[in-house]
Amino acid sequence: MQVRQGLCPLLLIVTLPLFAQSASAPATSSSVSTRVADLPMVMVSGVQPGPGLWKVSKGDHVMWVLGTLSPLPRDMQWQSQEVAQVIAASQQVLLAPAVRLEAKVGFFGKLFLLPSAYGARKNDDGRSLQDVLPPQVYARWQVLKQKYIGRDRGVERWRPLFASEELYHKALKANGLSRSGGIQASIDGLAKQHGVAEVPVEYRVVIEHPREAIKAFRQAAPHDTTCFIRTLDSVEHDMPEMTARANAWAIGDLQALRELPDSDRRDACVAAVTGAGFAQTLGLDDVPARLRATWLAAARKALATNAQTFALLPMDGLLDQDGYLATLRAEGYQVDAPE
């Protein structure tokens, strides 16, 4: 799931990349994880085609769907002739489901919110991570911070939720991975080149009282620890599997993507946000379900209106037995996986 930022600099926007790619189903076999962990992490590079496209159709109306993944190989150059041809012949490009936050404040109101928004990234009362984390968890953090972040002292004052995101980002970079692989930028370029309209698929959240939202977010700090611990686990142990999944996407190996386990880090971190009391007030308590409903409604409309549509979805939404395309299949649409 992509995340598109709204109109205000609320700290909540900083947390939303946690929704950027939903976790897939658990691994089908523990032996897969063990086997991958024993392999050297050799990253795919150069020009790569990525996976084939799923076909969703009803009558003579068709939608071609590309499954996206995060992270991807940093030095990969994605180039898909199939995608270029499909976009050129489509009437619309349906973007991946995204959350859009908007605040009911004017320009000067946004400026006044900036200090409190950025301040909420830090722990209350000037406390450090050492003050708010269990000693054994902080000891693990120190080892990984030294390895991937270095001597940055500022991050020690951040809330665990934000500190863990910084660590995760640095660890991906150090291991030759990229959050996006430049896929969206390539899609944007193809749509512009062929004059095809891109259609955002957004679950829109309007924040009526931004200052109160920031205050409530600060009070939800205890929920951060679970996300922080799971991120440490992921950085310590999941990099071989992440690399293998990234490589499998790059070369279009769908069988490997079905077999390789995905980290449950995002589930833990999304729960840290959506499980807090303030999330229900803002309409963020059930984001995955709301995004799913929003995309499915847009897909049905596109299939009814356009002769051909190109669409983006997270890979797990295509592979999971109860994913997005499974829902369309149950509704009577013809769904065909790539050969």
Image (cartoon, rainbow, N blue to C red):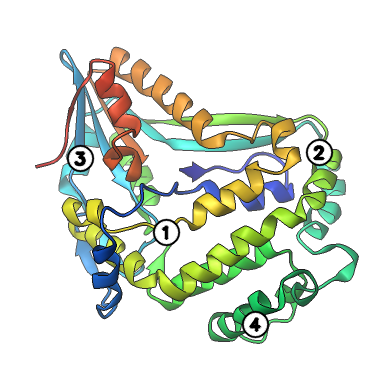
Mark 1 neighbour class, 10 Å CA radius: few under 14, some 14 to 19, many 20 or more: many
Q: Is residue 300 left or right of residue 259?
A: right
List the residue tagged with mark 1. Answer: 263
Residue 228: horizontal and vertical position, in percent?
A: 61, 64
N-terminal of the two: label 2 or label 4? 4
* Camera-side mark, 3 or 4: 4
Q: Amino acid at mark 1?
A: Ser
Task: Report the front residue among 276 and 317.
Answer: 276
Q: Secondary structure at mark 3?
A: loop
- How many discs mark residues in the rendered view? 4
* Camera-side mark, 3 or 1: 1
* Disc number placed over residue 139 in the picture, else none: 4
Residue 145: horizontal and vertical position, in percent?
A: 60, 80
N-terminal of the two: label 3 or label 1? 3
Residue 238 visible: yes
Residue at x 47%, y 25% (from the top left corner): 294
Q: Alpha carbon of mark 4 to alpha carbon of mark 1: how far?
A: 22 Å
